[in-house]
Amino acid sequence: MFKNLIIIISLPILTIALSIGINNYRALNPDPVPQIHGMDLDTAEKMLFSTADNCMNCHNNLVTSSGEDISFGVDWRTSMMANSARDPYWHAAVRREVMDHPESQTAIEDECSTCHMPMAHYQAETQGQMTQVFANLPGSQTVTEHSKLAMDGVSCTTCHQIKSDNFGERESFVGGFLIDTEKPMGQREIYGPYSVDQGRSNIMHSSSGFVQAESKHLIESELCATCHTLYTHTLGPDGEVIGELPEQVPYLEWKHSSFVNDQSCQSCHMPVVEEDTPISSVWGQPREDVSKHSFRGGNFFMQRMLNRYRDELGVQALPQEMDAAVNRTIKHLQTKSAYISITNSEVVGNELIADVNIENLAGHKLPTAYPSRRVWVHFSVTDEDDNVIFESGKVMPNGSIAGNDNDLTGNQYEQHYSEITEEDQVQIYEAILVDPQDRVTTGLLTAIRYIKDNRILPKGFDKVTAEQDIAVKGSADNDNDFTGGGDRVRYRVKLQDVTGPLQVNAELYYQPIAYRWAQNLDSYEAKETNKFVGYYNSMSEYSSVVLTSAKISVMN
């Protein structure tokens, strides 16, 4: 017995109790009410989750034969999955919703914790309790097991315990994933895509308290859909539900595209290692098609913000790890998101005509998910001396777009264009929300529908047959050049007293948190909103990135 204890003595005390058995631990512990991490053993036995540090003993220090570090823990802790509960924009957005709908604060915090604090939320729900957001943020209270689960975000024992019973069904969305709540800790199954022999299974159980089970459902898009398909309820003056908004539905967009037949969410966001490699640093055996746990997404700006304000936000990844993650995210966006080209360019009389073509390379709308995201065309024409003759879509240092109506005033928005003739016309691919009175808003629980949704469609997306939750909204629906796979915009530029060759440039910009979505929080006087707006304003010049660009010369 003592030999076994020596092997696992460096692991958390809960793991020790599980490895020797809860009942045996009771017998060995002389206290009248044995405690584990401040919990009595009955409570500990009912715990459904453990934090990621319990998994990293074996799933870090993973290096391929070619020298690539694919450590799951290192990659995960730089991702938005790991930092979902630390996200300062989320903190500010939840506070804004609570201030807009104070009578619904308890319900709002509980629902918003479903996918940002999934372990704490699910654990509390099984005990008939509701989860608080602000009480579990860094520095908010004494550290408890509940707050540790909350701050661990979307962690290992969340995704790897999800069952496939309701996959793809409406009830699985909005965090409606299923986890076995019957088996006590020490007997709980943890799913993975590989079969494991008994010896390795014993090692994992001794280390983590979980029992390995092989299942391929972890590589299905429906796993991701459980939290990345979100509907929010529109609330009336007294907190009553008066509508429903498809806040973000990339899974449904993917299902309506040609990607559904051959590419899953994981194939892009968890790319496969190109060589066989072990997934454990302890007695690991080479595995094929190992998925990296970098969870490549699009929010490079938030990763930058988390790194800069790491101490205030409790970020655990090292600075150099976050820097590397930002670079990976931007590289992914610039190689896998879009392609832009300029065609049919010519000077006719005193007018330059050029078509800008944008191709969506992603398996969902571009941009997709949270509606604060936007993509736009920066189009410019210069003469042979680099003098600007025409410019549409210039990004400003404060993160706004020159000429964009919505950035100038929050109650307006820029329409979709098939043809642009003026500098204050900007082709912005975005989702614009309105309230029941058709007033433009960035409040999710105030919004009741989209008045504009011209986000670039993925290949195979049919505008005509698309259901309402993913339908094109606004004038883009009648634009024959706006189709599945991309869009074409014609630019007409008046030329006066311009001689010599012209340089035509087109850039496709992307911004995860649009200027208006940030600035609308400035009127809310609260710690969370003040903090985020301050962060945003200090970093606004880094809030966007060029996805793709093209340039040509045209003789005048």
Image: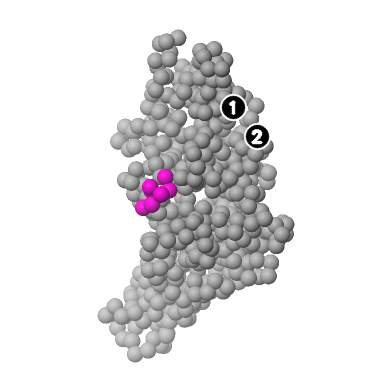
- Residue 485 visible in rendering: no
Which one is nearer the viewer's eye here, 478 or 153? Answer: 153
Compared across the picture, whether 143 is left or right of 462 comes to left
Q: Which of 502 and 21 is in front in this view?
A: 21
Q: Mark 2: give few (<14), some (14-19) or many (20+) Cα within 10 Å.
A: few
Q: Outermost residue toward the left? A: 385
Return the residue nearer the eye: 399 or 225: 399
- Mark 1 vs mark 2, CA separation in Å: 10 Å
Residue displayed at 35% across by 69% down: 551
Residue type, numbered disc 1: Thr
Relative to the observer, which residue lies in front, 484 or 188? Answer: 188
Total number of numbered discs in the rendering: 2
Task: Tell me the tag on residue 43.
Answer: 1
Q: Name the residue under label 2.
A: 127
Is residue 528 visible from the viewing direction of this image?
Answer: yes
- Residue drawn at x 59%, y 59% as measured from the top left: 99
Is 165 magenta? The answer is: no
Q: Where is residue 274 in the image (x, y as percent from the top left)?
A: 39, 38
Q: Are marks 1 and 2 in contact (CB under 8 Å)?
A: no
Q: Residue at x 54, y 45 (%)?
A: 135
Query: Residue 528: percent from the left, percent from the top?
Result: 49, 55
Scheme of colours in the image: one colour
**Residue range of the region highlighted in magenta in the rendering:** 308-314
| Residue lying at 37% horizontally and 27% vertically, measured from the top left | 281
Quadrant the C terminus occupies: bottom left
